[in-house]
Image (tube, grey):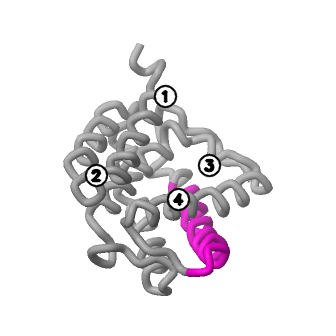
Amino acid sequence: MMKRYSVIINFIVFQVAWFAVFFLNHQAVPVLLLVIGIMAMMSPDRKSDCMFVVCGLGVGLMIELIAAGTNVIKYVGGPIPVWLVLLWCTLLFSFRESMGKLFTLPLKIRVPLVWLGAPGSYYAGQQADLLITANPTLFFWLVYGGIWYCGFESLRWLNSHPKLKRKIGTDGVLGT
């Protein structure tokens, strides 16, 4: 029964992580660790998903380092806060489960969805005083969206790598 609802539960648990950061800011670390534990335990292919998270974290942190290094984003409290690393882990688990469909969307849908959608959560993070985005807002949205889209395509490639591919679960075949 749990597997039947794993996509929904995974999505809800990811939202708990995101809102914990939004409302608790830097004090969200224990909640994020709990969420990561839940996501790992619920994973239909724990070994593959955990490997994807570890490898994908390199891509995620590269996105953040490029954005911070080019002054597109500045994080309060340091170059890459602990909560952000943990939030990336929850996002990577979600990519394999509740957001797996994003990897299979056609290019004409994937590009605008990721390019324009991803910066929104960072803009919301600015409203919670977690980070500062470049001005004007349109510049931030376009540049960070582009950085994020390149990272997303790297994650998409990682998802299809034979050593990281899921044996079971919601993983789909890559579209063009």
Dividing the picture into quarters, in which one does residue 27 lie? bottom left
Q: Position of residue 49 (x, y in %)?
A: 39, 44
Report which residue position mark 4 lands on.
155
Residues under numbered marks 3 and 2 in contact, where contact means CB atoms less than 8 Å apart: no
Report which residue position mark 2 lands on.
24
Report which residue position mark 1 lands on.
8
Q: Position of residue 23 (x, y in %)?
A: 34, 50
Amino acid at dot 4: Leu
Q: How many marks are shown on the rendered structure?
A: 4
Residues under numbered marks 3 and 4 in contact, where contact means CB atoms less than 8 Å apart: yes
Q: Nearer the viewer, residue 169 or 119?
A: 119
10 is higher (above) or lower (below) than 163: above
Give, as a single range, the part of the protein colored magenta.
Answer: 135-158
Circle 3: is it few (<14), some (14-19), or many (20+) Cα within 10 Å? many
Secondary structure type for disc 4: helix
166 is higher (above) or lower (below) than 60: above
Amino acid at dot 1: Ile
Report which residue position mark 3 lands on.
103
For marks 1 and 3 on the same chain, the one whose residue lies earlier in the sequence: 1
Write the residue at 53% across / 33% down. Answer: 170
Secondary structure type for disc 1: helix
Circle 4: is it few (<14), some (14-19), or many (20+) Cα within 10 Å? many
Q: Position of residue 32 (x, y in %)?
A: 28, 48
Nearer the observer, disc 4 or disc 2?
2
Secondary structure type for disc 3: helix
